[in-house]
Image (tube, grey):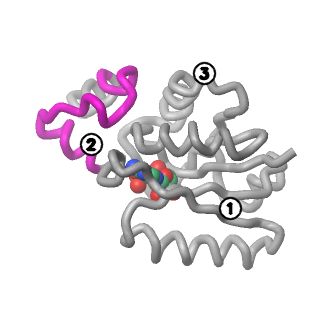
């Protein structure tokens, strides 16, 4: 059984992420969406909220599992039996960082492979930080994130 892991901060999940998850779920027997706990960076949403939202918007995809993880991705992969890292690639700007990460993870565990999936053109400009920026200044985030995510992001930003 081929288990893939799609790691990220998902703060919040966007339609670009969801597109990669849907397409990734067709490639792997099981796809784990791994929500990275970054101890150095406090995000907009709590980790549990991110996990809950991703679970909600992926509930109709039976081979997708969502969980948070701390520490090294390669250690989390051993625990979850995932052997392949799935990453989305937007522009050239993503490449340098992802290239470094892929090589580092392979150095840490030579059994681990990283595969890249090209963004769908309509989401190529989309990132969680761009969504937060737009929402912060009152812009419309419809179509950028799943509908369930919209009120949560807006309320969180208002509460800050
Ligand atoms: P963001 O950059 O939006 O804050 P994350 O750190 O949560 O996102 O990203 C997790 C993974 O999803 C990374 O591999 C990133 O390149 C990919 N990704 C993010 N947004 C998109 C998108 N619009 N299309 C394709 N891949 C994406």
**Image position of 110 (left or right of 34):** right
Reading the image, the residue beneath label 2 is: 132
Q: Which callout, 3 or 2, points to the residue nearer the camera?
A: 3
The boundaries of the magenta stretch are 130-151
Q: Can you say whether 119 is above or below 13 in the image?
A: below
The residue that mark 3 highlights is 59
Dot 3 or dot 2: first in sequence order is: 3
Whether residue 148 is in magenta: the answer is yes
Q: Quadrant of the N terminus?
A: top right
Q: Within the magenta stretch, is there residue 145?
A: yes
* Distance from mark 1 CB to nearest ligand 1 atom below 8 Å: no
**Looking at the picture, does residue 65 appear above or below residue 39?**
above
Q: Position of residue 48 (x, y in %)?
A: 54, 31
The quarter of the picture where the C terminus appears is: top left
Q: In the image, 70: left or right of 126? A: right
Residue plotted at (25% across, 29% down) = 142
């Amino acid at each position: 059984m081929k288990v893939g892991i799609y790691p990220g901060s998902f703060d919040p999940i966007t339609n670009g992420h969801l597109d990669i998850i849907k397409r990734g779920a067709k490639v792997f027997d099981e796809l784990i969406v791994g929500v990275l706990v970054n101890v150095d960076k406090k995000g907009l949403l709590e980790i549990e909220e991110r996990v809950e939202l991703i679970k909600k918007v992926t509930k109709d995809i039976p081979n997708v599992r969502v969980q948070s993880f701390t520490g090294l991705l390669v250690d989390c992969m051993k625990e979850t039996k995932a052997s392949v890292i799935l990453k989305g690639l937007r522009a050239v700007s993503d490449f340098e960082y992802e290239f470094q990460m892929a090589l580092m993870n392979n150095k840490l565990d030579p059994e681990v492979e990283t595969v890249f999936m090209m963004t769908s053109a309509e989401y190529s400009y989309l990132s969680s930080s761009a969504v937060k920026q737009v929402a912060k200044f009152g812009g419309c985030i419809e179509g950028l994130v799943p509908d369930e995510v919209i009120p949560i992001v807006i309320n969180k930003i208002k509460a800050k």
